[in-house]
Image (cartoon, rainbow, N blue to C red):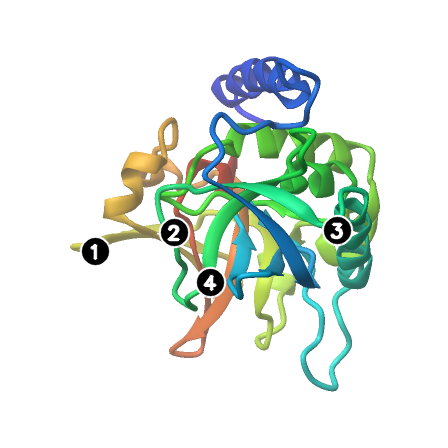
């Protein structure tokens, strides 16, 4: 069961975001300002496009299933997400409005932006509502995060799109393959809490650890990492391997659901 405090917070968030998802003007998670207007030249996948001016834009707040770049198969619903994005853009002649967040570029040099159709609808929210992506919040880019998670919640509750596939259900940490990687939802009980000078580590069964940098604690309001020993958690993020062990970095409260002890 979810803790009483978490349940109360989730209930308040759901009510607030249900109103906001619809938007004051009927649009899904609308923008408060517009920083640029552009035309999309190419759609790489469900969360990355190329503009006519040559910029590659990574949509903020969304992670869609990966399309294979080599001979390995694409993730389930990866091509469906790309097709859906193309169809959405085609209705407006591929014209979009963009809003920047705190950071304007990611580590790959891509432009980070929230993209909207001319009618005000958020492309991120539309994909999330169809179950064709997972909501993510990567600090310091936190604008509209609550609205995006509310859009995802409806799709997950109804098992729409990717949420109907076992690949995207939370997996027990003990069942993860040692070669597991990429974006995943994992669950398990916190067996140990380790304190380091710059980080906090939550060890789950099966040799899987969640890493929280202390500089990110400002984004984990309502979560007490040190007190989580014995609690069940569901974490979302990107798995990586270091020293033979699987790890996942937790940077925002939305990335970890805490269940009662």
Q: Earlier in the sequence, mark 3 or mark 1?
A: 3
Q: In the rendered view, would you say 127 is above or below 143?
A: below
Left or right: 217 in relation to 246: left
Q: In the rendered view, would you say 160 is above or below 239?
A: above
Q: Earlier in the sequence, mark 1 or mark 4?
A: 4
Q: Position of residue 153 (x, y in %)?
A: 68, 32
Can you identify the residue that label 2 sits on? Answer: 104
Is mark 2 in CB contact (under 8 Å) with mark 1?
A: no
User: Can residue 160 be seen from the camera position used here?
Assistant: yes
Q: Earlier in the sequence, mark 4 or mark 3?
A: 3
Image point (70%, 40%), residue name: 128
Q: Position of residue 123 (x, y in %)?
A: 67, 41
Can you identify the residue that label 4 sits on? Answer: 110
- Of badges 1 and 4, nearer the viewer stands 4
Q: Residues within 10 Å of mark 3 (few under 14, many from 20)?
A: many
* Element assignment for label 2: loop
Can you identify the residue that label 3 sits on? Answer: 85
CA gap, disc 1 to disc 4? Answer: 33 Å
CA gap, disc 4 to disc 2? Answer: 8 Å
Decide which of 80, 24 is in the foreground and name it: 24
Is mark 3 in CB contact (under 8 Å) with mark 2?
A: no
- Of badges 2 and 1, nearer the viewer stands 2
Image point (69%, 62%), residue name: 43
Decide which of 75, 116 is in the foreground and name it: 116
Can you identify the residue that label 1 sits on? Answer: 196
């Amino acid at each position: 069961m979810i803790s009483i405090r978490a349940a109360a917070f989730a209930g308040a968030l759901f009510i607030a975001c249900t109103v906001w998802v619809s938007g004051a003007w009927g649009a899904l998670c609308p923008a408060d300002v517009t920083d640029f207007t552009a035309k999309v030249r190419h759609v790489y996948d469900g969360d990355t496009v190329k503009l006519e001016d040559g910029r590659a834009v990574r949509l903020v707040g969304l992670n869609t299933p990966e399309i294979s770049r080599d001979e390995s198969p694409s993730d389930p619903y990866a091509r469906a997400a790309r097709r859906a994005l193309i169809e959405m853009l085609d209705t407006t002649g591929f014209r979009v409005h963009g809003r920047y967040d705190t950071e304007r570029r990611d580590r790959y040099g891509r432009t980070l932006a929230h993209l909207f159709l001319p009618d005000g609808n958020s492309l991120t929210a539309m994909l999330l509502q169809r179950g064709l992506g997972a909501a993510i919040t990567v600090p310091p880019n936190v604008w509209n995060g609550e609205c995006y998670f509310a859009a995802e919640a409806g799709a997950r509750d109804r098992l729409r799109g990717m949420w109907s596939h076992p690949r995207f259900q939370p997996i027990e940490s003990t069942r993860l393959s040692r070669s597991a990687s990429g974006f995943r939802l994992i669950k398990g009980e916190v067996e140990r809490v380790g304190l380091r000078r710059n980080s906090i580590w939550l060890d789950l069964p099966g040799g899987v650890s969640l890493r929280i940098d202390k500089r990110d604690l400002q984004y984990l309001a309502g979560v007490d990492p040190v007190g989580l020993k014995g609690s069940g958690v569901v974490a979302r993020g990107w798995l990586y391997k270091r020293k033979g062990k699987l790890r996942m970095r937790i940077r925002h409260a939305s990335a970890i659901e805490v269940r009662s002890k």
